[in-house]
Image (cartoon, rainbow, N blue to C red):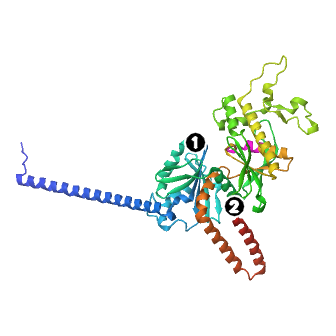
Amino acid sequence: MTTLALPPPALLARSVALQHRHEVFWTRVFFFGASCIAGLIIARKRKLHRFHLHILTTKAHDFGRFFGMDIGGTLAKMVYFQPSGGEISKHMRQPNHEEGCLSHIEAYILGLHSSDRMRTAQREEYLELHVPELGGTIHFFKFVPVYIYIFQTSKMEEIIDFVRHRFFHRYIKKISCTGGGAYKKLGIEIYKADEMDALIKGMNFVLQHAKDECYTFKNVVLETHGLCEADKTIVPTPTSSELYPFLLVNIGSGVSILKVSGENTYERVSGTSLGGGTFWGLCRAMSKLQSFDEAMDASLEGDSNAVDMTVGDIYGDSGYGQFNLKSSTVASSFGKMGATKPNAPPKRIVRDEDLARSLLFMITQNVCQVAYLNARRVGTKRIYFCGNFLRRNEMASRQLSYAIEFWSKGEMEAQFFHHEGFFGALGSFLSQYKESNLQKHMAASVEAKAETTSSSSSLPDVRRSGSKNNSNGSGHKATA
């Protein structure tokens, strides 16, 4: 039997001391490394904090002037102006700033797409608008929570979260907004722009700078069910001297009719309480439909003849020839619901889809008649329609086109906008940006064109063409 020899006490003590020194060494290394990392984090935060304070105290570094927002009762909209160059200082684009760098923020913004339905913010890339007079490109966004199609004003926290998580608040001092009222969070001042002023400003800007902006529907076949057949046609925008005056019919919960006489000159000439709110309110009262979008989808499946009384129901299939009224013309909306005859069989059950279809027709016909009469009163043949009621509502647009053509006997046409819904956000951006930047870009653009014209004066043909283009360009800019 063998016994293990124990190390002498001196050797054991030496081993323990050596192990202790190793522990002390690595503990010091750990604390030194942790201190270095903490110091770097603190220094970086202080640097970003100083930079943020510099932005808040320097107007030239306020990134908020490149944004405009419209926070209404439906979708929240935003526009972002991307300067072509020189507007954002090089310091704010430094690549060594990670989450704080504007180049990263801009890359994220421009990386959004309308096809990505799982994002709250979606960029409508097909509406992108390049404006040389402003020196850049305007991008259009909408905020749509993934769990619901309607973005309520009370959900503004989602925009704040969007701003917070992307560090926008480090570069923004003030943002112009319409529809949502004054709001202040994350150190960002959001002041309210006048809703109607922003609407008119944005609409006039688009009419002047967006090619093929307006469209109408021709050859509309007014069916009692399904989507009415029609030809969608682009309407050329008149020159600034021929554009005004025109009538703007804004269909929201109610209807406001504005006479626009100039770029910043407008007045409310009429209106009606029977609008989109009336349509949805009656749908809720008379049917089991749960949302506005559901009501619009149901109207596509409905048959208005089950509810409306037509000229044919009164005068037969030949209609009323003396007044050129076809048998299919509606004589009384919901007329069949109240018509009774002696010993008549029980009234058949009317579907929710039929009610929605008849209500949509009734509202659009009433709006069009009021719009047509006001167009005659103010002396214009141009009638533009906009408003939340037309969102995802192409059938209403087709019915409006049919009704205006019917009442005017083909002399007028209803026109609609591709950028509809973004005028408030665009106008709020312009109200803040144009004051300090637009005149500078306009002057630079005019000066550049003047230099181009003078340099080509030695060539007669080219000089004529250049002079003509410069004249048109100057007139275009004078109205911007």
Circle 1: residue type: Gln
Instruction: Specify the quadrant that holds the C terminus.
Output: bottom right
- Residue span colored magenta: 390-399
398 inside magenta stretch: yes
Q: On screen, 273 above or below 236?
A: above
The quadrant where residue 29 appears: bottom left
Q: On screen, 242 above or below 228?
A: below
- Residue assigned mark 2: 209
The quadrant where residue 139 appears: bottom right
Along the line of sight, the residue nearer the viewer: 247 or 348 = 247
Whether residue 194 is visible: yes
Which residue lies at the image location 37% right of the left edge and 60% below the top edge? Answer: 46
Which residue sits furthest bottom? 458
Q: Secondary structure at mark 1?
A: loop
Q: On screen, 443 above or below 79?
A: below
- Residue assigned mark 1: 152
Along the line of sight, the residue nearer the viewer: 30 or 36 = 36
Which residue lies at the image location 83% right of the left edge and 46% below the top edge? Answer: 405
53 inside magenta stretch: no
Along the line of sight, the residue nearer the viewer: 75 or 123 = 75
Residue 7 at x, y = what percent?
7, 51
Circle 2: residue type: His
Residue 110 at x, y = what percent?
56, 57
Horizontal side of residue 395 vs 173, given as left or right = right
